[in-house]
Amino acid sequence: MHNNKDQTGHPVRPHRFWIIGAGRFGQIAVDRISRHIPGASITVVDKQAIAFEDAGIGMICQDGIQWLAASLDENASVDLIVPAIPVHVAAAWLKLTLKRLFEINSVAIPDAWLSQMPHAYRGATGQAFVSHADFICPDNCPEPREICTHTGKTRPLDLFRLLSQLDFDNVLPIVLRSYQLLPGVGGVYPADLLTAQAAVCNNSCRPLMIATACRCHGVVDFIRLVKKPAPAEPG
């Protein structure tokens, strides 16, 4: 979905990052990006300000989802958004940006749907966490394409592909891939979020599955949108 290529069609390595969250995983992302990508531009967003040793790292003291909703558009100066908070960032951002137009209702997940997703367990209403792994993965896994680092066995179908192929009774799957940047650090492309937003608006009559997943792990939210009536004309 994303457009991250130069004029010759070759992939461009991201160098401008928004890290949503300054907790443990946010700080891991800052450390690894700083060490491995010279000249990276890093902006960290969290309600609680953190002092980083590198004075070039920008710190914005705001709610991450609200800031993302106010800041992300097609002209935003960012190449990769790194979610590092215990929230499904894509789903939360979509809900916030669409609430002016739609009532947004969570859809309870039937057992029959849950059973189609690997090692799935329920979160809040309408949400599930899914994984190909039934063990705790190391946080420095390089996510090889063919073989699982932990088991040495052939990797199953990429989870982001599997989720997009499931059939949930007319539910429209909108799956964002989390791309691994470095071991233990992954993110979504801004263009993918904006494309997902357009897809949601264009298919609001159907129940939706909003998912973010890498090759092995993911989170899904099932929602239904109800168009709000247009404001009455004055006078």
Image: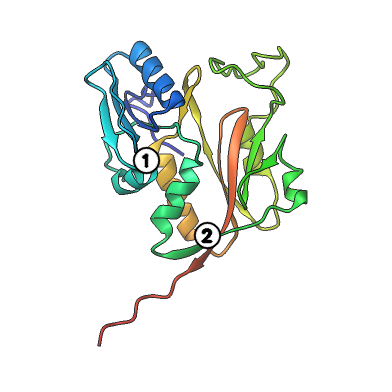
* Labelled disc at residue 203: 2
* SS class, disc 2: loop
* Labelled disc at residue 180: none
Q: Mark 2 or mark 1: which comes first in sequence?
A: 1
Q: Amino acid at mark 1?
A: Gly
* Labelled disc at residue 64: 1
- Marks 2,1: beta carbons within 8 A: no
The residues bearing labels 2 and 1 have C-alpha atoms spaced at a distance of: 27 Å
- How packed is label 2: few (under 14 Cα within 10 Å), some, or many (20 or more)? few
The residue depicted at 61 percent of the width and 31 percent of the height is 217
Rendered location of residue 96, percent (x, y): 41, 54
The residue depicted at 43 percent of the width and 75 percent of the height is 229
- Label 2 vs label 1, nearer the camera: 1
- How packed is label 1: few (under 14 Cα within 10 Å), some, or many (20 or more)? many
Rendered location of residue 103, percent (x, y): 48, 65
The residue depicted at 33 percent of the width and 26 percent of the height is 6
* SS class, disc 1: helix
**Left-right relation of 24 to 67:** right
Q: Amino acid at mark 2?
A: Asn
Quarter residue 61 falls in: top left
Rendered location of residue 10, percent (x, y): 39, 23
| Front-lying residue, 110 or 191 | 110
**Left-right relation of 216 to 34:** right
Vertical side of 117 occupied by 169: above or below: below
**Left-right relation of 110 to 74:** right
Quarter residue 19 falls in: top left
Rendered location of residue 178, percent (x, y): 51, 32
**Left-right relation of 37 to 155:** left
The residue depicted at 34 percent of the width and 81 percent of the height is 232
| Front-lying residue, 69 or 156 | 69
Image quarter (top left, top right, bottom left or bottom right) of the C terminus: bottom left
